[in-house]
């Protein structure tokens, strides 16, 4: 997809849905917790788990680090895969403590490439989670690619169905200026579009980008 195509797609989505105001969180640490908890589940489930942690007074790196693993798992149960995600939260906090003395600001102030490499070294933190943390917690321009992004670009004919994460991310980084506000809004708009129209079984009627989409149903 050419530069103008990606920029044009952004403006079509923005005109259709308006600003999304994503990521919904109170501070960088909550963003990080949410990025881990929303893996393989809907945001609504992750949000319920975050609320449980907040009510328990554990939305703080030191308090969460000192909390028993089974206590964390029980609180984040609404996010699904709660035992694994409790371990992932602990892995992040151990990384933060060992490398940065528990200082979240020091971590988030790292240059983008160093920050990304560090996050990807944490067990349970993959590229989508790492880029979510970089973009929404650190405010640095790293584009987040999720299943909605891949599905949309595949249906538009911009990528092959087997295209990998880094290839898709590279398209956005090459086509767009390095603006974290733009990246965050674009990602949120793709998610919104994926939920409303570009589902696994697409709802092409009244789709705001049907005129540029070659999917068989889009022209009906």
Image (cartoon, rainbow, N blue to C red):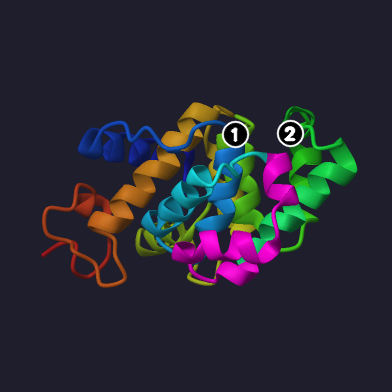
Ranked by sequence position, the earlier of labels 1 and 2 is 1
- Whether residue 106 is visible to the viewer of this picture, yes or no, is yes
Question: Does the magenta run of residues contain 64?
Answer: yes
Left or right of residue 118: residue 76: left
Residue 167 placement (x, y as % from top left):
61, 56
Left or right of residue 34: residue 151: left
Q: Which residues are magenta?
A: 61-84
Q: What's the mark number on residue 104?
A: 2
Residue 136 placement (x, y as % from top left):
55, 36
Depth check: give the residue in front, 1 or 15: 15
Depth check: give the residue in front, 69 or 172: 69
Q: What's the mark number on residue 141?
A: none
- Whether residue 135 is visible to the viewer of this picture, yes or no, is no
Residue 37 placement (x, y as % from top left):
54, 57
Q: What's the mark number on residue 28?
A: 1
For label 2, the SS is: helix
| Quarter residue 141 falls in | top right
């Amino acid at each position: 997809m050419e530069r103008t195509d990606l920029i044009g797609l952004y403006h079509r989505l923005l005109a259709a849905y308006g600003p999304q105001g994503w990521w919904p969180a109170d501070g960088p640490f909550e963003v990080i917790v949410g990025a881990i908890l929303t893996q393989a589940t809907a945001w609504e489930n992750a949000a319920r788990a975050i609320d449980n942690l907040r009510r328990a007074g554990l939305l703080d790196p030191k308090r969460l680090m000192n909390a028993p693993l089974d206590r964390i798992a029980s609180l984040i149960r609404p996010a699904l895969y709660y035992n694994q995600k409790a371990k992932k939260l602990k892995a992040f906090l151990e990384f933060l403590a060992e490398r940065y003395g528990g200082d979240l600001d020091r971590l988030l102030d790292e240059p983008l490439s160093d920050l990304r490499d560090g996050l990807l070294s944490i067990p349970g933190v993959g590229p989508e989670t790492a880029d979510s943390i970089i973009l929404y917690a650190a405010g640095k321009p790293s584009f987040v690619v999720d299943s909605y992004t891949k599905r949309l670009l595949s249906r538009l004919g911009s990528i092959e169905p087997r295209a990998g994460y880094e290839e898709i991310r590279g398209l956005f980084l090459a086509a767009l200026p390095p603006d974290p506000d733009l990246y965050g809004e674009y990602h949120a708009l793709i998610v919104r579009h994926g939920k409303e129209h570009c589902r696994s079984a697409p709802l092409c009627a009244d789709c705001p980008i049907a005129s540029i989409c070659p999917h068989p149903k889009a022209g009906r």
